[in-house]
């Protein structure tokens, strides 16, 4: 079959163009075909589309780590034409991705689009929203309740951080959003549900113990830190780590922003 796609091809640097491709190509295990209606441009896709290294494991390849559309055929309990989404699962990295009219994804990774959610919204949430949801779930799993105190979200002006602010606020947490772009992103972060927006420069620096902007040590203020910027652990609860968490390495600060882990 042939379909339209953005294809990144060999070159110095590799180049992307819209073209017609012949499938199936780069087939994942246990594949199911999705007729794609929407995708997104994640950071990884931007790297791939601009010829950057490390994302597309072979060339030529179609980038796009997210895809939303309808099933082209029955799969498991889902019938053909079911609205579905897939985030990650090797799309746009090891096999052709979602920036195409059609994509093959491993059946296990394909989920139904929730009732009431448009394909456009599902694509806009994408892997960044999915990642923020994992952070919110981690807080819940480790017993941090909305009434426990404020939750600090660092990197909140970015993709994952802004979804984290929105999700946590919707779950009833009191969210303090830290950003280096207060004037640019502050109003939007408040609209997303942040109760306070703080300048990241006031939180301390990498390697130092994190302090609130009023100078108090973070541990007397934050119930938790949902930090897309720093990931020795995805969430840090106040006091000792909950049962099951590995102890934080002694050389690492518990919640301070650091340079991007990307
Ligand atoms: N996007 C995804 O799907 C995904 C999935 C898994 C993991 N991740 C990881 O999650 C992290 C955030 O990804 P993202 O897509 O949200 O990136 P992003 O949109 O580029 O946002 C990153 C944010 O980090 C803040 N930041 C940048 N430099 C900083 C510094 N020197 N000190 C403190 N904060 C700094 C900025 O926040 P302000 O604008 O508020 O200043 C920036 O907006 C990355 O480490 C990424 O690898 C992302």
Image (cartoon, grey):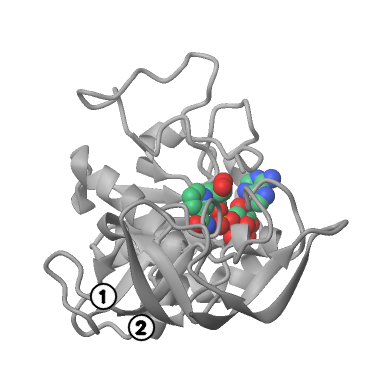
Displayed quadrant of residue 92: bottom right
Name the outermost residue toward the left.
Answer: 77
Camera-side residue: 249 or 19? 19
Give the position of the C terminus as an image quadrant: top right
What residue is rendered at 63% in x and 51% in y? 55
Whether residue 121 is visible to the viewer of this picture, yes or no, is yes
The 10 Å Cα crowd at callout 1, few under 14, some 14 to 19, many 20 or more, is many
Q: Circles 1 and 2: CB distance less than 8 Å?
A: yes
Vertical order, 246 against 184 (above or below): above
Q: Earlier in the sequence, mark 1 or mark 2?
A: 1
Residue 92 left/right relative to 201: left
Instruction: Locate residue 113, reporting x and y percent.
Output: 26, 75
Q: Quadrant of residue 220?
A: top left
- Residue in view at x 70 percent, y 65 percent: 8
Q: Which residue is mark 2?
A: 119
Residue at the outermost top position: 250
- For residue 195, say whether it is visible: no
21 vs 46, nearest the viewer: 21
Q: Position of residue 63 (x, y in %)?
A: 59, 64
Mark identifier at residue 46: none
The x and y percentages for residue 192 are 42, 73
> Is 42 rendered above or below residue 244?
below
Q: Residue furthest right?
A: 12
Q: Residue at x 88, y 56 (%)?
A: 12
Instruction: Give the residue at mark 1.
Output: 113
**Tally of numbered tags:** 2
Residue 113 as seen in the image, left or right of residue 220: left
């Amino acid at each position: 079959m042939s379909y339209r796609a953005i294809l990144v091809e060999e070159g110095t640097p590799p180049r992307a163009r819209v073209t017609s491709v012949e499938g199936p190509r780069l087939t994942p295990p246990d594949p199911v075909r999705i007729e794609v209606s929407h995708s997104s441009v994640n950071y990884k896709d931007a790297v791939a589309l601009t010829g950057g290294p490390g994302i597309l494991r072979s060339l030529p390849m179609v980038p796009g780590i997210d895809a939303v559309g309808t099933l082209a055929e029955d799969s498991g309990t889902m019938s053909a034409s079911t609205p579905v989404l897939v985030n990650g699962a090797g799309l746009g990295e090891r096999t052709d991705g979602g920036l195409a009219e059609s994509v093959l994804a491993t059946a296990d990774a394909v989920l139904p689009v929730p009732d009431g959610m448009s394909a456009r919204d599902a694509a806009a949430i994408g892997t960044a929203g999915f990642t923020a949801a994992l952070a919110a779930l981690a807080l819940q799993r480790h017993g941090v309740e909305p009434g426990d105190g404020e939750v600090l979200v660092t990197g909140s002006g970015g993709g994952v951080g802004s979804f984290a602010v929105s999700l946590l606020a919707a779950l009833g947490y009191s969210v303090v959003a830290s950003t280096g772009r207060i004037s640019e992103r502050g109003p939007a972060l408040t609209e997303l549900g942040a109760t306070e927006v703080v300048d990241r420069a006031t939180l301390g620096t990498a390697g130092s113990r994190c302090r609130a902007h009023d100078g108090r040590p973070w541990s007397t203020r934050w119930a938790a830190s949902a930090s897309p910027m720093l990931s020795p652990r995805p969430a840090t609860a106040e006091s000792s780590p909950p049962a099951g968490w590995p102890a934080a390495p002694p050389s690492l600060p518990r919640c301070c922003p650091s340079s991007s882990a990307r």
